[in-house]
Amino acid sequence: QKEVEQNSGPLSVPEGAIASLNCTYSDRGSQSFFWYRQYSGKSPELIMSIYSNGDKEDGRFTAQLNKASQYVSLLIRDSQPSDSATYLCAVQTGANNLFFGTGTRLTVIP
Amino acid sequence: EPEVTQTPSHQVTQMGQEVILRCVPISNHLYFYWYRQILGQKVEFLVSFYNNEISEKSEIFDDQFSVERPDGSNFTLKIRSTKLEDSAMYFCASRPPGLTGADTQYFGPGTRLTVL
């Protein structure tokens, strides 16, 4: 059974702060990792993908991957109220299917 | 920017009825997926489809479910004899061909299925 674990939150941060979201996964053979953002009642929207150990930055977002620890994280710098959403960690298996975590609900307080 | 589209946005049906959920993937994509999300729960993989056949299916995707690509653009999910527990948001996704870096799946807006 492939598991993807996330702290469900809610995580509250003040506007302008750094939000840190974490995810662990069980399948050591996983190769591709994704962070999606989901607003209530909407579909998942891709924020970042990461495939290699280390950091990957895109604007205010930084994804971090540590395959040895089976750990993926997402940092959001200068958090904005519009960042308030549920953040989904997804892991892609060799069959190219995505396994999602339950998501972390983030609230950015103005 | 190309996007995945789904119809209808909301489908209400009676228990035991058949429903067909429709998706139009992004035009140059070759891999297609259906996921579902029961209210308040995580997104769950149902089935993947490539080259006009099912690549993989989850335990959820039993004989009640079927998928089809009836023409060059549509991708459908049929649920026969719907049950109350089939009530969920159903997402279609597609991804382009290619190597790593093209693994990203793009999701449609979803169809909310309500079974009464």
Image: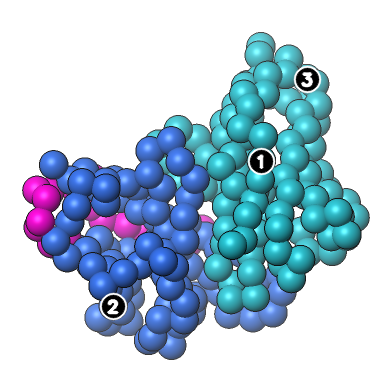
Q: Which quarter of the rendering shows the C terminus of chain B?
A: top left
Residue of label 1: A6
Q: Position of residue A77 (x, y in %)?
A: 80, 31
Residue positioned 35% across, 67% down in the render: B61
Quarter of the rendering containing residue A60: top right
Q: CA distance from mark 3 to mark 1?
A: 23 Å
Residue of label 2: B68
Residue type indicated by callout 3: Gly
Same chain for the residues under marks 3 and 1 in the image:
yes
* SS type, badge 2: strand
Residue of label 3: A16
Tell me, what hue is chain A? Answer: cyan
Q: Are marks 3 and 2 in contact (CB under 8 Å)?
A: no
Residue type indicated by callout 2: Glu
Q: Position of residue B25 (x, y in %)?
A: 41, 68
Range of the magenta residues? B1-19
Q: Position of residue B78 (x, y in %)?
A: 23, 67
Q: Are marks 3 and 1 in contact (CB under 8 Å)?
A: no
First in sequence: mark 3 vs mark 1: 1
| Mark sitting on residue A53 | none
| Residue closest to the far top | A110
Q: CA distance from mark 2 to mark 1?
A: 34 Å
Tell me, what hue is chain B? Answer: blue
* SS type, badge 1: strand
In this picture the colour scheme is: by chain
Residue positioned 56% across, 42% down in the render: A102
Answer above or below: position of B36 versus B29. Answer: above
Residue positioned 66% across, 40% down in the render: A6
Quarter of the rendering containing residue B64: bottom left
* SS type, badge 3: loop
